[in-house]
Image (cartoon, rainbow, N blue to C red):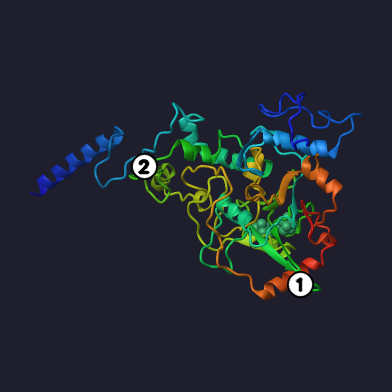
């Protein structure tokens, strides 16, 4: 039997610093067509350069993804551009009920923790348990800021604090936010939180403070450094791999290929917000 | 007696002026010119005199570039200042802005200018997390009530499948 993810002989760069071949031209099948499986495999190999694998037991492999994927690292001095649109694809069928790895990872990464006020504590990401009213079947899915292309939060913000980066990531500029919370009311996904308590010892790369509204930043500090959002990384570590992150504009990225291949949906797509977060099996 | 006291005062005043003027350690109980902690390298990213006067300008420029454009160069970043000018406390860890020895506080206290930066920003260096998976749960024990779930279900079922 042919092993999955075998590194072909002609792929000399797979084991080294990471492949710098153009994904669209490298290692395609006969006829030169870009084969989705091949591109998916190429993505894996590219990532695999930064992955440490340990075989725990026959058939059980522990994979540790390195923080940085050289594939999308940008020079620190370069501005983000609209050539990219960062997005997530979340497969609810792979999201295990009761698992909160993504929520915990986000909280640890960005430093939002309980202040003992459950009704108002910040929640950048939460898991929802969805139950069908007709047959009672349930599934779980994570929900965070959907990084809308037409974000209502930005529309209503009176100060310009709520804004969209060129690469589609929606953020709050806390230097400008006056804490009016219009955006919280406007967001159809209840993705935003207001910080009610004074905070100390924030994460150096994730400033946050009392009096401002905040929400999922798609781990913008990691993304700018070529990394992956903390939730995606944590989900992969559980082995569920329900979330993938990538550039929706790059036709050869895994996320774009999957969105083009499978039927994905967006939460409340009818609202026309055009979220960057896609779901499968919801 | 009276004449003696005048004479003593004069001597004390002259002595104090000499101390302050020479930039040495001020007399106890007297605020001397601030002595902010030195950075790690040989010199600051800009000339020190210029930074004393204009550091807020570069920081503000950098903050806009970083938040809106994702430009994350270290040279004029607040994180850079904090990393380089850290002051270690008794426990060997860098002190936060709540400690009067903190780099920013030495001058800001002297000039009586409140620093707002640290309402949101970390005032001491910290390591970026290398992994996303720790075990403490942020809202452990907070259950979502059945009515919330029903309301969300209704909401989600309106999605454009
Ligand atoms: S999900 Fe909410 S907070 Fe996020 S971009 Fe859309 S409207 Fe704004
Ligand atoms: S709370 Fe802040 S970000 Fe939200 S609408 Fe008001 S000013 Fe804008």
- The residue beneath circle 2 is B92
Q: Residue B77's image quarter?
A: top right
Q: Is residue A157 visible?
A: no
Residue B147: x %, y % from top left:
68, 76
* Label 1 Cα neighbours within 10 Å, binned few <14 / some 14-19 / many ≥20: few
Between B106 and A265, the one nearer to me in the picture: A265
Between A232 and A56, the one nearer to me in the picture: A56
Compared across the picture, whether B41 is left or right of A79 comes to left
- The residue beneath circle 1 is A136
Q: Is residue A110 visible?
A: yes
Residue visible at 86% across and 46% down in the picture: A260
Quadrant placement of the N terminus of chain A? top right
- Name the element at disc 1: loop
Between A92 and B91, the one nearer to me in the picture: A92
In the displayed structure, A192 sits above or below B60; it is below
Disc 1 from disc 2: Cα separation: 57 Å
Residue A209: x %, y % from top left:
55, 55
Residue A114: x %, y % from top left:
53, 62
The numbered mark 2 sits on a residue in which chain? B
Q: Residue furthest left?
A: B1
Any atom of ligand 2 within 8 Å of the CB at mark 2? Answer: no
Mark 1 or 2: the one toward you: 1
- For the residues beneath circles 1 and 2, the answer to whether they share a chain is no
């Amino acid at each position: 039997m042919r092993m999955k993810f075998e590194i072909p002989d002609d792929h000399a760069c797979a084991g080294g610093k990471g492949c710098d071949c153009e994904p669209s031209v490298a290692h395609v099948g006969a006829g030169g067509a870009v084969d989705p499986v091949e591109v998916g495999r190429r993505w894996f190999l590219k990532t695999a350069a930064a992955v440490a694998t340990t075989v725990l037991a026959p058939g059980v492999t522990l994979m540790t993804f390195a923080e940085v994927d050289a594939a999308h690292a940008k020079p620190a001095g370069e501005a983000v551009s609209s050539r990219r649109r960062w997005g997530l694809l979340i497969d609810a069928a792979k999201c295990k009920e009761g698992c909160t790895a993504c929520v915990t990872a986000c909280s640890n990464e960005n430093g939002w923790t309980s202040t003992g006020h459950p009704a108002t504590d910040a929640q950048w990401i939460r898991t929802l348990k969805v139950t069908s009213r007709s047959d009672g079947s349930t599934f779980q899915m994570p929900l965070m800021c959907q990084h809308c292309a037409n974000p209502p939060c930005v529309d209503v913000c009176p100060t310009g604090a709520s804004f969209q980066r060129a690469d589609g990531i929606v953020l709050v500029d806390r230097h400008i936010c006056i804490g009016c919370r219009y955006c919280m009311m406007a967001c159809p996904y209840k993705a935003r939180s207001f910080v009610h308590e004074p905070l100390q010892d924030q994460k150096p790369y994730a400033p946050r403070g009392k009096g401002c509204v905040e929400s999922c930043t798609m781990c913008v500090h990691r993304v700018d450094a070529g990394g992956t959002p903390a939730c995606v990384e944590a989900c992969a570590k559980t082995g569920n791999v329900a979330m993938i992150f990538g550039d929706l504009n790059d036709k050869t990225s895994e996320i774009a290929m999957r969105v083009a291949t499978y039927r994905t949906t967006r939460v409340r797509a009818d609202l026309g917000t055009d979220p960057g977060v896609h779901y499968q099996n919801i | 007696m009276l004449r003696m006291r005048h004479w003593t005062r004069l001597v004390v005043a002259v002595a104090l002026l000499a101390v302050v003027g020479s930039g040495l350690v001020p007399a106890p109980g007297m605020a001397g010119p601030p002595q902010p902690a030195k950075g790690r390298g040989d010199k600051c990213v800009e000339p020190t005199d210029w930074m004393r006067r204009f550091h807020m300008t570069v920081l503000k420029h950098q903050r806009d570039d970083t938040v809106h454009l994702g430009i994350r160069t270290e040279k004029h970043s607040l994180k850079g200042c904090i990393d380089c000018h850290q002051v270690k406390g008794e426990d060997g860890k860098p002190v936060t802005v709540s400690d009067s020895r903190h780099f920013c506080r030495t001058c800001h206290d002297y000039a009586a200018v409140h620093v707002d930066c640290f309402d949101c920003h970390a005032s001491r260096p910290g390591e970026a997390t290398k992994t996303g998976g720790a075990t403490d749960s942020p809202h452990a024990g907070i259950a979502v009530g059945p009515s919330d779930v029903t309301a969300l279900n209704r909401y989600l079922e309106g999605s454009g499948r």
